[in-house]
């Protein structure tokens, strides 16, 4: 999945094990697995470009540094009940619960991001859904929430 310029780590994700797919205009892209993983199991080693700006598909390594991975983990979908944990210091991703073939790889964006590129209404439908997705250091952006309510024509759980 990664270009040859990233090297040949045997733990890099393989196209035979994962696929980045386009869902719809609301969900965007996601990563599905063709393999099963047990809790704690290494899913893949990560790679990408280290950049200083927040983008839609970057993940924060530390304050002011982000990993831009446009081949794999930059497309993980959000869930308030994730099935993966990203260790960006070691550039790895592990299963935190059982993952079956055909499942999406799901992370909690607030796990890694102080401030999101763009806040949004959560649609994960988990029992512990927070309703609005933000970075772990930011409060919900009231203007964005009001605009989402206008677009949806309904109330959003806040």
Image (cartoon, rainbow, N blue to C red):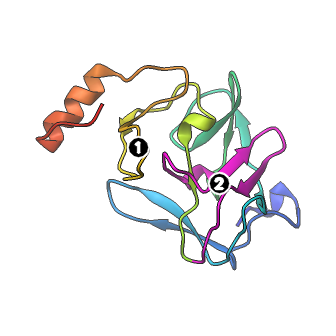
At which x and y percent is residue 44? 77, 61
Q: Are marks 1 and 2 in contact (CB under 8 Å)?
A: no
How far apart, in angstroms, are the residues tagged by discs 1 and 2? 16 Å
At which x and y percent is residue 77? 50, 53
Q: Is residue 41 above or below residue 26?
A: below
At which x and y percent is residue 118? 42, 33
Residue 151 magenta-drawn? no
Which is nearer the eye, 146 or 12?
A: 146
Q: Is residue 7 above or below residue 147?
A: below
Tag on residue 42?
Answer: none
Mark 1 or 2, closer to the camera: 1
For the C terminus, the quadrant is: top left
Magenta residues span 73-101
Q: Is residue 9 above or below residue 67?
A: below
Q: Quadrant of residue 41?
A: bottom right
Residue 99 magenta-drawn? yes
Q: Which residue is mark 2?
A: 84
Q: Residue drawn at (55%, 35%), measured in percent from left and top?
A: 110
Q: Secondary structure at mark 1?
A: loop
Q: Residue furthest left?
A: 153
Q: Earlier in the sequence, mark 1 or mark 2?
A: 2
Q: Which residue is mark 1?
A: 129
Q: Taking 3 as reference, is 139 left or right?
A: left
Q: Secondary structure at mark 2?
A: strand
Q: Taking 46 as reference, is 125 left or right?
A: left
Q: Residue drawn at (70%, 67%), measured in percent from left and top?
A: 1
At which x and y percent is residue 52? 67, 27
């Amino acid at each position: 999945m990664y270009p040859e310029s990233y090297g040949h780590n045997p733990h890099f994700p393989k196209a035979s094990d994962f696929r980045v797919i386009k869902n719809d205009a609301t969900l965007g892209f996601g990563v599905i697995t063709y393999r099963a993983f047990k809790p704690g199991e290494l899913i893949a080693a990560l790679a990408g470009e280290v950049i200083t700006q927040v983008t839609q598909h970057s993940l924060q390594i530390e304050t002011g540094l982000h990993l831009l991975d446009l081949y794999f983990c930059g497309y993980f979908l959000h869930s308030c009940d994730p099935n993966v944990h990203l260790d960006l210091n070691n550039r790895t991703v592990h299963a935190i619960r059982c993952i079956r073939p055909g499942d999406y790889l799901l992370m909690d964006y607030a796990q890694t991001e102080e401030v999101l590129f763009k806040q949004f209404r959560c649609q994960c439908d988990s029992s512990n859904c927070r309703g609005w997705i933000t970075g772990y250091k930011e409060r919900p952006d009231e203007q964005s929430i009001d605009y989402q309510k206008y677009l949806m024509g309904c109330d959003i759980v806040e």
